[in-house]
Image (cartoon, grey):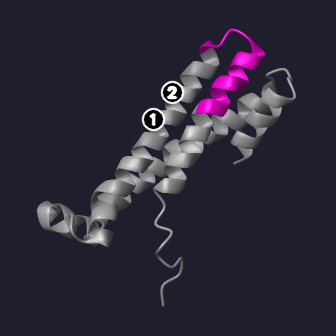
Amino acid sequence: MVALCSSYHGWLARRPYGRIAHLANRTLFDVLSLQVLLGLILYALSPLVRIGLGELGAAMGVKELRFFAVEHITGMLVAVTFVHVSSIRVRRAPTDQAKFREAVIWQTLTVVSILVSVPWWRPLLRT
């Protein structure tokens, strides 16, 4: 959210694309890449995913199995793809405003993809 807000602020206020904006974008890139690596490890170890992938046809009818076996990982991989595209597009943009515009577009898509892929219906702490 910090990187996204920084990009929107720089774009709307017509600020120069400086060190802070670069640092925010780079941090988003690094943190999300690390999160995906950890998520893939958890995906490989998850009993829900094992069950879901074992009987994929049957799992499509069960909300929780379908979500974790297919929907969650797909959405998160799309998000990390968006952040990687953002990094490339921002680096190649010719002007500061173009850099911020590219960052705003791709970071917004990243955040939307992440928000759609979060299991909001599950309790954060299970008892």
Query: Residue placed at 47% from the left, 73% from the top?
Result: 121
Residue 2 position (above or below residue 62): above
SS at mark 1 in the image: helix
Label pair 2/1, CB-CB below 8 angstroms: yes
The magenta segment: 92-105
Residue 73 position (above or below residue 64): above
User: Label 1 neighbourhood size at 10 Å, few (<14), some (14-19), many (20+)?
Assistant: some
Marker disc for residue 85:
2
Residue that carries the numbered disc 1 in the rendered image: 81
Residue 54 position (above or below residue 36): below
Quarter residue 10 falls in: top right
Residue that sits furthest to the top in the current view: 94
Type of residue at label 2?
A: Val
Image coords of residue 96 (percent x, y): 76, 16
User: Label 2 neighbourhood size at 10 Å, few (<14), some (14-19), many (20+)?
Assistant: some
Q: Is residue 94 magenta?
A: yes
Q: Nearer the viewer, residue 84 or 37?
A: 84
Type of residue at label 1?
A: Thr
Quarter residue 4 falls in: top right
Query: Residue placed at 33% from the left, 63% from the top?
Result: 68
Image coords of residue 70 (percent x, y): 29, 55
